Amino acid sequence: MYKIVSIPGDGIGPEVVAGAVAVMQQLSKKHGFEIQIEEHPFGGASYDLHGEMLTEATLEACRNCDAVLLGAVGGPKWENLPHEHKPEAALLKIRKELGLFANLRPAKVYDALIDASSLKADVVRGTDFVVFRELTGGIYFGQPRGFDATKGWNTMVYEGYEVERIARLAFEAARQRKGRVMSIDKANVLEVSQFWRNVVIEVHKDFADVELSHMYVDNAAMQIVRNPKQFDVIVTGNLFGDILSDIAGMITGSLGMLPSASIGTKHALYEPIHGSAPDIAGQNKANPIATIASVAMMFEHSFGRPDIAREIEQAIEATLAAGLRTADIANPGDATVSTTAMTEAIVKNLSA
Ligand code: NAD
C-alpha cells in the first residue's frame, strides 16, 4: 500500500492535483496495488481556514506518509501578508522540516513539443537529463549573513556530509540512466567549490562504474543551451542549481510540463515547478502534465517502480502525439483542450 498526502494548495493547484489523483487511481486499478490518498490544506487555503499557511496537522501528516504530492501555493489574496506568513515561508518550512536536501528537476524534451522550445529542434531533440540541486545548504543558509548601510554579505559553506549525501543520490540515479555524472562548481575561484569537488571525487570511488566529470558553472550555463544532449545527471550546489535548473527547464518548452522531486533521507515531496497561475485559476485551462509527471517521479524515486514511471511518461507522450494541447502548449490557431480533457486522455492511454 502507498500512503500519499495530497496538498492541492491554491489557484490551479487543486485542478492539476485532481488530474494526478485520477492517474494514481487508474494505476491502482490496473496494477492491483492500494493507494491511500489523504488531502490536507496548505498555503492560502490553509491560511483562510486556520490562520496559518502550514499547520502542525498538515506537517505531521507529511511526516507519516510515503510521499507528498503538492500542487502550488500563493496568489494575490495573500501577497501582502507579513513575510513570515507568506506562502514562500511555508514552502521553505515544509522542505526544512522534512529534511528535503536534494531537488531533482528533469529536462526532457517531448518529440511532439519540439517546436515549443526556444532552441532549434536539432539542438534539443533527444535531450534527457536531470539536475540534482542541493537544497538545504550553501549560500542560501550560510552564516554570517546581513547588510548594513555600506555593505552586504553572505556565506557559502558546505559540510562534507552535505556534499556526500547528494553526490551519492546522483551517482545512484546515473546507474539507472546513462551512467554519467557531471558535477558543476566554480573550483577555479571558490575554495568551497574545491572542497565540493574533492568530496565528489571521494564518493565516486564507491561508484567506479559511473563516469564522473566536472564543469565550471559559467561554462555549464553555456553548454546547456549549446548542446543539452551531452548531459545525463548534473549535480551541483544550491545557488548554481537554482539558476541551472531554470535554464534546463526552459529549453524544454512550457512551464506546464515540468515536474520536480525534493528528496531527503526519510521523506520526499513531488510538485510541478510552476506556481498557482492565478490568471487561469478556476477556468479548467491549466496543463496537468507537470503534476502528472511528478507522480511518475514519485513512483521512480519513492516507490522503486521505474516501470510505472515509464508507463506514465508513455501515456503523456501518446496523448501529446495524438495532438491534444492545453492552451499553454498550443500553437496559435490550434484547437485546445481543458485540464479535465487532457487528464481523461492520459488516463485512457494508461489503460491501453
Ligand atoms: P506561475 O508559474 O503561477 O505562472 C506563470 C505563467 O505561466 C502564468 O501565465 C500562468 O498562467 C502560466 N502557467 C503556470 N502553470 C501553468 C500550467 N500548469 N498550465 C498552463 N499555464 C501555466 O508564476 P507566477 O505568476 O509568477 O506566480 C503566481 C503565484 O504562484 C504567486 O503567488 C507565486 O508566489 C506562486 N508560486 C508558487 C510556487 C509554488 O507553489 N511552488 C512556485 C512559483 C510561484
Image: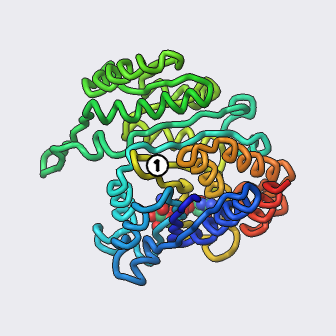
Q: Secondary structure at mark 1?
A: strand
Q: How far across and how far down the image is residue 82, in percent?
A: 29, 72
Q: In this orientation, which residue lies closer to the viewer: 206 or 222?
A: 206
Q: Residue at 38% across / 45% down in the picture?
A: 101
Position of residue 264 measured from the top left corner of the image (x, y, whole percent) = 40, 46
Indicate left or right for 283 with 151 as reference. right
21 relative to 148, above or below:
below
Residue sitting at x 69%, y 39%: 109
Residue nearest the viewer, comparing 239 with 157 = 157
Quarter holding residue 307: top right
Quadrant into which the N terminus falls: bottom right
> In the drawing, does residue 215 fall left or right of residue 314?
left
Q: Amino acid at mark 1?
A: Ser
Which residue matches tag 1? 262
Height in image: 99 above or below 205? below
In the displayed structure image, the side of residue 106 where residue 154 appears, left or right: left
Indicate which quadrant contains ligand 1. bottom right
Residue 117: image location, x then y, percent: 68, 42
